[in-house]
Amino acid sequence: ARSFMIGDRMTDIIAGASAGCRTVLVETGQHLAPLIETSDSIDDSILPDHTCASLAEATRWILEMI
C-alpha cells in the first residue's frame, strides 16, 4: 500500500494494482494501445489512481501522497 507503480499502458496499471500498489498512468500515447497479451487473467475494470501527462507530474502527485 506504500508502493507506487507508474506506467504508460493499462497492463502496467493492472499489474501494479494486482500487486497492491497505488497506480499512476502516464499518457504517452501507449496508454491507448491494446492490453499486452498474457496467459494470466486480466481484470480490465481496474482504473489508475491517478492519470497525468508526464513523469514529472506523476512524481509530484506521488510526493503529495506520501
Image (spheres, helix red, strand yellow):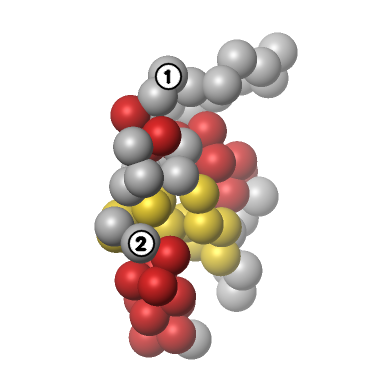
Of 53 and 18, the residue lying toward us: 53
- The residue indicated by pointer 1 is 34
Left or right: 50 in relation to 10: left
Q: Is residue 63 above or below residue 30?
A: below
Marked residue nearer the N-terminal end (2 or 1)? 1
Q: Callout 1: 10 Å neighbours few (<14), some, many (20+)?
A: few
Q: Amino acid at mark 2?
A: Ser
Q: Callout 2: 10 Å neighbours few (<14), some, many (20+)?
A: few
On residue 15, which mark appears? Answer: none
Q: How many marks?
A: 2
Of 57 and 22, the residue lying toward us: 57
Residue 12 pos. (x, y %)? 55, 41
Residue 26 pos. (x, y %)? 38, 52
Q: Amino acid at mark 1?
A: Pro
Residue shown at 38% from the left, 80% from the top? 60
- The residue indicated by pointer 2 is 54
Residue shown at 65% from the left, 50% from the top? 19
Residue 44 pos. (x, y %)? 42, 26
Residue shown at 29% from the left, 59% from the top? 52
Residue shown at 42% from the left, 57% from the top? 24
The answer to whether the residues at label 2 and label 1 have Cβ atoms under 8 Å apart is no
Residue 57 pos. (x, y %)? 34, 71
Quarter of the image for residue 10 reads top left
Quarter of the image for residue 55 reads bottom left
Q: Is residue 35 above or below residue 21?
A: above
Q: Is residue 32 above or below residue 4?
A: above
Where disc 1 sits, the SS reads: loop
